[in-house]
Amino acid sequence: MSVNIGKFESALEIAKRIFGGTKYHASDEKIKKLAENMILLEQRGLNKLNQNLINNRKKIWDFFAEHNFAIKLLSHLNEDIPISYEPHPGFRRRPIDFKIELGDITYWVQMKKLSTLERENRQDKIIQQIKRETTRINIGKFFSIKLSENFTEADVAGFLKFLEKSANNSEEGVEYVFPDTNQRKAIVEFWSPKNVKPPHLTLRISSDADIVEITGSADNQIRGSLLNAAGAFKWNVDEKNINLVVMDAYRYHDRNICNAVFGTEFLILNSNNPNIFFNRNNDGFFQQCEFSNRVAGVIAMRRKAKEPISDCYFFALYKQSI
């Protein structure tokens, strides 16, 4: 379905519908910001990005990342610089996402959202189970949970009993630790809503108890995603064509990205030398012969907060050594 965004009022209604189809509760400010972004993209000839956001509900978070990236491009490049989205007619099965023409040099950009780690999939199932089970606890409060990586399905039954016991006499602003302060598998906070009282104990926020470090899993995940993205390029990098992969790297360590891009880091110990040295294996993305000449660099996008519409990004460039 092709939609003409047109006036701001029309864009505002479309933005409301987009957010209405997600679990994200957008503020009026975020809805307004999305509407403004959609109008800007349409004015600059990138309305296809809007159409993807409107029509593709299954991968909407991927398209939010592309949407934000395009807005960042437009905010830093003059209006006379040609920017195209999925421009190459010969690549219908695997189109390049962005084409940017700066003088005699063309920058080809392929976006890649890193897939969810297996661990995060497991944790999401646990969280969904907790949300279902707490509907049976008749205490009209909200709660948030932070789960550690060693929280498993075997802990759910005990955790539900802990929730019911703790919620009855809970105080706002106090952290309750499960099963105890020595193990800390989960951290919970309770609060009473200001307006409508929920009919049961209701989960509102969930996150990790601390930064998760699963080096091998994350490294392989990122490396595989980069190889997949690089497959879109059918030509090598040269002085006229610069191919880049941009990935939404929210929650991934720089260490994991470096291992995936440049090779797994390892420690060198020498009994005859007290100094510690580090080196890398040749398993990095840039060491893969098939793609080593096709990609000039990898750009990691990191948001300050996990929000679909964000102006606050950090960008890091990982490039091949010459």
Image (spheres, rainbow, N blue to C red):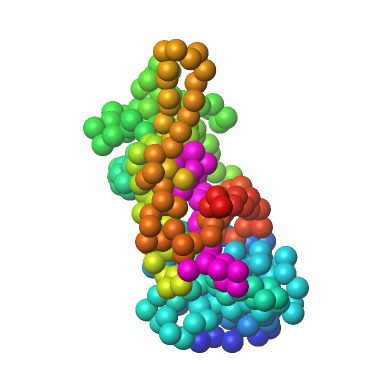
Q: How many marks?
A: 0
Does residue 294 appear in this view?
A: yes
Q: x, y (%) of residue 312?
A: 66, 53
Residue that appears at 75% across and 73% down: 78
In the image, residue 244 lies in the stretch drawn in magenta: yes
* Residue furthest to the front: 272
* Rendered view: 200 above or below 160: below
The answer to whether 204 appears left or right of 34 in the picture is: left
The answer to whether 100 appears left or right of 223 in the picture is: right
Q: x, y (%) of residue 294?
A: 46, 64
Q: x, y (%) of residue 113?
A: 45, 58
Residue that appears at 41% across and 13% down: 271
138 and 109: which is toward the camera: 109
Residue that appears at 33% across and 30% down: 150
* Rendered view: 10 above or below 217: below
* Rendered view: 283 above or below 172: below
Residue that appears at 37% across and 49% down: 221
* Residue furthest to the left: 154
179 and 208: which is toward the camera: 208
Please report the bounds of the magenta region as a residue range: 236-261
Q: x, y (%) of residue 60?
A: 46, 66
* Rendered view: 255 above or below 300: above
In the image, residue 266 lies in the stretch drawn in magenta: no
Does residue 170 appear in this view?
A: no
Q: Quadrant of residue 152?
A: top left
106 and 168: which is toward the camera: 106
